[in-house]
Amino acid sequence: MPVIPHLRAEGIVTFVEPCAGAGNLVAHLCRFGFLCAFARDLRDGFDALTCDPNIFQSADAIVTNPPWTRSVMHPMIERFSDLLPTWLLFDADWAHTKQAAPYLDFCSHIVAVGRLKWVPGTKHQSKDSCSWYRFDRRHSGGPQFIGRPSNETAKSYVGAPASC
């Protein structure tokens, strides 16, 4: 998982996942030794945009695959990056759009992932390339782009939900 070395380099041990869905990302990160301090989702009545911000303070970072709908994702970028260093997984093309301009100054990293397999058992990858984006309001000067190693193979973050 391309974000793992960056999380470790940053000294992240605990994370919160405010858009947890079925828990696949949580399970994946826990398999690498990270500790999930909090994982919820809108499906269980949790709204990451209106919740008490103190619940995020139990972790070193926010790590999530947010909804890609810009009207939801952009407010999440703003809110989360005010609270903690925030790693978000979403489409790689976003960084090349006008709508990204207000956020790129406090985006410190863009880590290329490529196309992912989102559906268990499928042999096909998605049609959109993805990247991990790190946002932090304490950062300025724009992102460092980290490309994919040439020996990487297709990724899948699908797995059993975790209970960590």
Image (cartoon, rainbow, N blue to C red):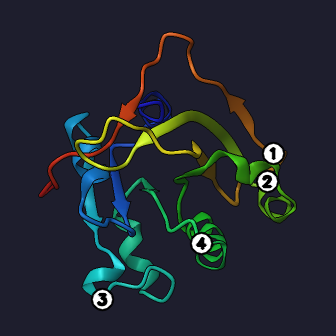
Disc number for residue 69 = 4
Which one is earlier in the sequence, the residue at label 3 or at label 4? 3
Which amino acid type is shown beneath numbered disc 3? Gly
Q: Is 155 left, or right, of 128 in this rendering? A: left
Q: Which element is circle 2 on?
A: helix
| Residue that mark 3 sits on | 45
Q: Which element is circle 4 on?
A: loop
* Distance from the alpha carbon under mark 2 to that under mark 1: 5 Å
- Label 4: how many residues lie within 10 Å, few (<14), some (14-19) or many (20+)? few
| Residue that mark 2 sits on | 104
Residue 29 lies, in percent from the top left, at 29, 43
Which amino acid type is shown beneath numbered disc 1? Gly
- Please state which of the two labelled residues, at mark 4 or mark 1, is closer to the viewer: 4
- Considering every residue shown, the one lying at the far front of the view is 123
Which amino acid type is shown beneath numbered disc 2? Leu
On-image quarter of the C terminus: bottom left
**Residue 132, quarter of the rendered image:** top right
- Label 1: how many residues lie within 10 Å, few (<14), some (14-19) or many (20+)? some
Residue visible at 21% across and 48% down in the picture: 27
Q: Is 160 left, or right, of 11 in this rendering? A: left
* Distance from the alpha carbon under mark 4 to that under mark 1: 23 Å
| Residue that mark 1 sits on | 142
Which one is earlier in the sequence, the residue at label 4 or at label 2? 4
- Please state which of the two labelled residues, at mark 3 or mark 4, is closer to the viewer: 4
- Please state which of the two labelled residues, at mark 3 or mark 1, is closer to the viewer: 3
Which one is earlier in the sequence, the residue at label 2 or at label 3? 3
